[in-house]
Amino acid sequence: MQFSAIKADVTRIETAALVVNLYHGVQRPGGATGAVDAALDGQISELIADGEITGKPGEITIVHTNGRLPARRIVVVGLGKKQECTLETVRKATGSVTQRLLRHRITRFHTILHGGGDLETTGVATRDLAQAIAEAALLAGYRYDRWKTVEPEEEPGEPRDREKEELQSITIVESDGRKLPSIRAGLSRGGLLADAVNWTRDIGNGPPNEIYPAALAERARRLAEEHKLEIEILTRRELEKRRMGGILGVGQGSAHEPRLIILRYRRGGKSAPSVIVGKAITFDTGGISIKPSANMEEMKFDKMGGVAVLGIMRAVALLKLKINLIGIVPSAENMPSGTSYRPGDILTSYSGKTIEIINTDAEGRLVLADALTYACEQNPKEVIDLATLTGACVVALGHYASGAFGDERIVERLTHVGAFTGDRVWPLPLYDEYGDDMKSEVADIKNSGGRWGGASTAAAFLKFFVKKGVAWAHLDIAGTAWTTKTQPYHPIGATGAGVRVVTEYLAGR
Ligand code: BES
Ligand code: MN
Ligand code: ZN
């Protein structure tokens, strides 16, 4: 995939498709769209006058030029009302256009810098616009088809030609040559971030018979080799030596043994490390407290917090951020069997604190308990965990924002960066009373606080294992980690939620 930026006049571009845009309510387009309209003898204005192009967000109109312009097609994408247009509007427009053009097997196209000249006057940097376009195009062009061996029905017998199916190149056409360096910097940054997200999606979409804890650890090892990260992988025996009773308890019902993966990235001199921790349950059946079978296949995505941590390590390495970062990924498979842990069991966590098991389906917090204790031993500057932790968070926020709990300063910054990146985060409360609901009659804490406020009681459980004084925040990505319907720049499957927002947070946005 090739991104480039050129100084040129849109009416002179030879391309399969040239993407321009339109705000809602504009009758006579100006700028690049106006120039194209003039060359088409006002065809676009006529379509607007007839109400066939409205400029509503997500609207895409393809006009063939029939030789009136060197571009074969003009693609007009709606950006909605000018005052409401944001970086996210640009991402969604770019994503929708990319998906549409790929359906028509157009894999190389040109586009103007959406929002250039307008968003810029409201303080959005040229570089960020270009980054948004690169990110959205690569994210929208993602496909997970590794396991498809039968050719699509539309072209029987035709050998597959990936050149015709996958995005090959996008060129930004800009009339102001002074903007080219910023555009190129943005394209490069967006390209790297999207690469890390798509890498995350690839592992995330991997089926649970392929991606079990030891296999995930091997992917982490390959990642570490590629980016010169330090890596440590604790096997079951090593977890036993360290008495990591949470990870061991959850993992004991499965034929696939658990692992703890630790990655270290050092480019920040002597500064204290940020630590990111991610839940990686490679499949969550619920264990003895077994889940209903409807949609259970989606529980292969219960590893996404941990996979996102690996993706963030990759993004940070690709961007060469000048920080110290430790990634900790506790991984297990939650299965029912004769060796499974049970409701009523009492586990002794790595911290020494004991946990009464009420429900074996509340397993994520158990592996995180050990990992958070380990994280707090690293003299961290801050600890951020990511986990597909609760169905309750999905009830609260749906699929368009991850829940954020804990340290107010971190949560506030994550919320801000979330809005900026479109990888959204929204604060939820963590009052002391939620901790009261987790009190056990027989152990130090129990692993389920019942039905109400489930996302917050889960966070309160995690907090019990965070050393006093450590700045810690928890992201519940249960509603955002995967999607079952196509979104403008998220195809069905793993989304890579958390990778962009946490990476940009670490980059100091
Ligand atoms: N992995 C699930 C949470 C989940 C459910 C994520 C649905 C995404 C969609 C987690 O391990 C779980 O089962 N949580 C329970 C906790 C309860 C037993 C206290 C839940 O949310 O119901
Ligand atoms: Mn569960
Ligand atoms: Zn789970």
Image (cartoon, rainbow, N blue to C red):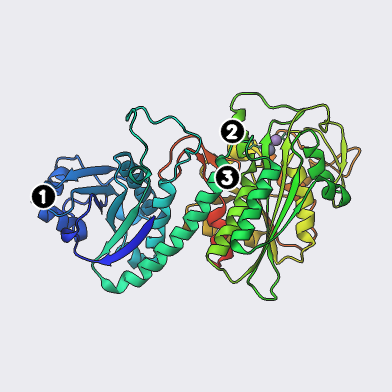
If the picture is divided into quarters, which one holds ligand 1?
Answer: top right
> At numbered mark 2, what does the secondary structure look like: helix, strand or loop?
helix
Q: Is residue 114 visible?
A: no
Name the residue rendered at 53%, 59% in the picture. 416
Which residue is label 3 attached to? 203
> Residue 432 vs residue 384: left or right?
right
> At numbered mark 3, what does the secondary structure look like: helix, strand or loop?
helix
Question: Which amino acid does the dot numbered 1 rest on?
Answer: Gly
Name the residue rendered at 59%, 33% in the picture. 298
Residue 378 image point, x, y percent: 77, 64
Q: Which mark is residue 298?
A: 2
Mark toward the viewer: 2 or 3: 3
Pick out the residue farthest to the top.
293
Q: Is residue 24 above or below residue 31?
A: above
Which residue is label 1 attached to? 67
Density class for disc 1 (Cα within 10 Å; few <14, some 14-19, many ≥20) is few
Tell me how far mark 1 sits from mark 3, CA to CA.
Answer: 45 Å
Question: Which amino acid does the dot numbered 3 rest on?
Answer: Ile
